[in-house]
C-alpha cells in the first residue's frame, strides 16, 4: 500500500505541480478561525467573509470579546452561522484564557471548542510547519476510490495514510488530493477519462 500511496503522490505532483491552500490568512489566528469556518462550505466562501471579520476582530483577544450577533452577521453566508459564531467566539475565549497562544499538538488543539482532528492537522501543518495530514471529504473519497483504504472513518483514514507516506509529504499529499477532488475526482461524476491516476485506481478498474 505504501507503494501505491507514493505512486499516487508522484502522479498528482507531476500533474498539478505546486499546489497552495485556498484559504487566505496571514497569521495563526486567522488560519485557525478560517479553518473552523470552512466546515460545510468552500474555502472561497470563507475568504469572502474573513476579510471583514479579521479587520474588525484582529486577534483571539478581540474576537473573545465580540458581540455574537455581529459575528453572526459577518459570517452568515458560510452557513451554520449560529453554531460557527458560537464556536469561534468560544474558541477565542478559550485561547485567550489559556494565555493567548495556541498549542502545537493535535491532542491539545482538539481540546479547544470547534477544533476537530481535521482542523488540528491543518493548523499544525499549514500554521506551524509540523507534519499533519487532514482528511476532509476529498481526501477520504479519493483514498477510498484509489483503494488506499476501505474505511469511511476520517480518523482511521488519517492514521492509514500517515503510515504510508513520509511525514514531509503529508501536507503536500493533502493539498494535491483536495485539488484533484475539485478538478477531476469530483464526488458525483469523476472525470476518469482525463485522470492521470487511472492506472492505479480501483474505482476506475472496477468501472471499466
Ligand atoms: S480514475 Fe477516476 S475515480 Fe480514480 S482517481 Fe481518477 S478521477 Fe478519481
Image (cartoon, rainbow, N blue to C red):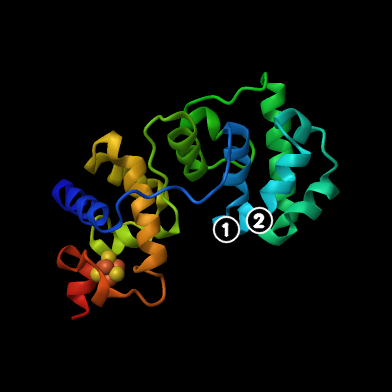
Residue that carries the numbered disc 2 in the rendered image: 48
Q: Is residue 203 left or right of residue 41?
A: left
Identify the residue shown where x is 27% and y is 55%: 149
Residue that carries the numbered disc 1 in the rendered image: 44
Q: Is residue 56 left or right of residue 181?
A: right
Q: Position of residue 156 (x, y in %)?
A: 35, 47
Query: Would you say residue 40 is visible in this rendering?
Result: no
> How much space separates mark 2 and mark 1, taking CA atoms?
6 Å
**Residue 89 image-quadrant placement:** top right
Extreme residue in the top direction: 99
The label shown at residue 12 is none
Q: Position of residue 194 (x, y in %)?
A: 26, 73
Q: Nearest the camera: 131 or 195?
A: 195
Q: Is residue 97 left or right of residue 158?
A: right
Q: Is mark 2 within 8 Å of ligand 1?
A: no
Disc 2 residue crowd, few under 14, some 14–19, many 20+, Cα 10 Å: some
Amino acid at each position: 500500500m505504501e507503494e501505491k500511496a507514493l505512486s499516487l503522490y508522484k502522479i498528482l505532483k507531476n500533474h498539478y505541480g505546486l499546489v497552495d491552500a485556498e484559504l487566505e490568512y496571514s497569521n495563526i489566528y486567522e488560519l485557525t478561525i478560517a479553518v473552523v469556518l470552512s466546515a460545510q462550505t468552500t474555502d472561497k466562501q470563507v475568504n469572502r467573509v474573513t476579510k471583514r471579520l479579521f479587520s474588525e476582530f484582529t486577534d483571539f483577544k478581540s474576537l473573545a470579546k465580540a458581540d455574537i450577533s455581529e459575528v453572526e452577521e459577518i459570517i452568515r453566508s458560510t452557513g451554520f452561522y449560529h453554531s460557527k459564531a458560537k464556536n469561534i467566539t468560544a474558541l477565542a475565549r478559550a485561547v485567550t484564557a489559556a494565555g493567548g497562544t495556541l498549542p502545537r499538538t493535535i491532542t491539545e488543539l482538539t481540546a479547544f471548542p470547534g477544533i476537530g482532528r481535521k482542523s488540528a492537522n491543518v493548523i499544525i501543518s499549514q500554521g506551524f510547519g509540523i507534519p499533519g495530514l487532514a482528511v476532509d471529504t476529498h481526501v477520504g473519497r479519493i483514498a477510498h476510490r484509489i483503494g488506499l483504504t476501505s474505511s469511511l472513518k476520517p480518523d482511521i483514514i488519517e492514521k492509514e495514510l500517515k503510515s504510508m507516506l513520509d511525514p514531509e509529504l503529508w501536507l503536500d499529499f493533502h493539498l494535491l488530493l483536495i485539488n484533484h477532488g475539485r478538478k477531476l475526482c469530483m464526488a458525483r461524476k469523476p472525470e476518469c477519462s482525463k485522470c492521470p491516476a487511472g492506472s492505479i485506481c480501483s474505482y476506475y478498474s472496477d468501472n471499466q
